[in-house]
Image (cartoon, rainbow, N blue to C red):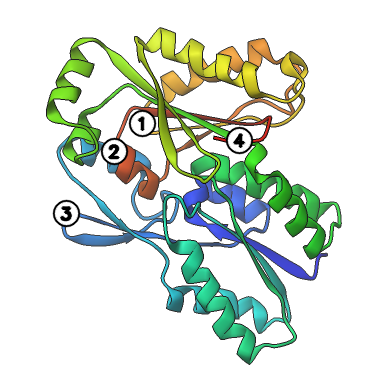
Amino acid sequence: MSDYILTCCSTADMPFEYFQQRNIPFVCFHYNMDGQEYLDNLGQTMSFQEFYDRIAAGAMPTTSQVNVGQFIGFFEQYLQEGKDILHISLSTGLSGVYNSACIARETLLVKYPDRKILLVDSRGASSGYGLIVDMAADMRDNDATLEDVYAWVEENKLNVHHWFFSTDLTHYKRGGRISATAAVVGGLLNICPLMNMSYDGKLIPRMKIRGKKHVIAEIVHMMEVHVHNGIDYAGKCFISHSACYDDARKVADLVEEKFPHLNGSVMINSVGTVIGAHTGPGTVALFFCGDKRDS
């Protein structure tokens, strides 16, 4: 058994049972919906279906990151057990949560000078961030040291690609992320924006594609362009979706058809409540390992 704990934030958007089975504790973001605050605890308090149904009915949730005090309490329980910690955080391009973890670390190391707390800015989000954590867990389970896992993640995190598309622009309009005119025109023309995560962990629009069928083909084409070893890719592939499982399944089927040597079937997860508060329903995201993100 390793002498360190691998941890992450709830925004890695993997199933609650996955984190339990793999012994990966996670610290929860929060969201506020209709005047009530909830933990982003991977569907335990509020199901993902209810969450997205309430957004579709007009709710506009807001989110809050893990603060310094919460990180101190979260980390300290493992330090008291004599464990070192490797914590992988949501991208600094989307949140200041990594900075909160850094302040907590400096505070705790005064009290626990013999312990190690190593922190990684994943430059990722949702199940792409989850894929980084998953690969770190594989190394841990194969007896890699804390320092070796940390070094590998830092070296390879930008090789994890994040591609997203949305078939529903309603929430983007409500949240002020696109204009009402752009939403109307996009709806009339059946425009599905294709986005990806840049090298600095920010979500960047890349293409405006007309029609769901075409955007599904294009997102898998982007995997063909960037993936390691082309159609012989033998790594893992994760997908997350916000209340649009059928669209996610179509992407997964196409990926499994084009890449027959995948490490297992494509894992399909739900976009969690914090990331989903910003995307709304209708988003599908595809994650895989490929060339290094440099733009």
Residue labelled with disc 3? 34
Callouts 1 and 4 close, C-beta under 8 Å: no
Disc 4 residue type (three-letter): Arg
Tag nearer the camera, 1 or 4: 4
- At x 45% / y 63%, what residue is drawn? 97
Callouts 1 and 2 close, C-beta under 8 Å: yes
Disc 1 residue type (three-letter): Ala
Q: How many labels does the image show?
A: 4
Q: Position of residue 198 (x, y in %)?
A: 51, 38
Q: Position of residue 70 (x, y in %)?
A: 45, 74
Callouts 2 and 3 close, C-beta under 8 Å: no
Quadrant location of the N terminus? bottom right
Vertical relation: 185 (above or below) 32: above
- Relative to 57, 70 lies left or right: right
Residue 111 found in image quarter: bottom right
Tag nearer the camera, 2 or 4: 4
Residue labelled with disc 1? 243
Residue labelled with disc 4? 293
Q: Which residue lies furthest to the front in this view?
A: 295
Tell me the crowding category of disc 4: few under 14, some 14 to 19, or many 20 or more residues within 10 angstroms, Cα based. some
Disc 3/disc 1 C-alpha distance (Å): 20 Å
Quadrant location of the C terminus? top right
Vertical relation: 184 (above or below) 56: above
Disc 2/disc 3 C-alpha distance (Å): 13 Å
Q: Which residue lies furthest to the right in this view?
A: 143
Disc 1/disc 2 C-alpha distance (Å): 6 Å
N-terminal-most mark, 2 or 3: 3
Q: Where is residue 181 in the image (x, y as percent from the top left)?
A: 13, 24
- At x 57% / y 58%, what residue is drawn? 8
Tell me the crowding category of disc 3: few under 14, some 14 to 19, or many 20 or more residues within 10 angstroms, Cα based. few
N-terminal-most mark, 3 or 4: 3
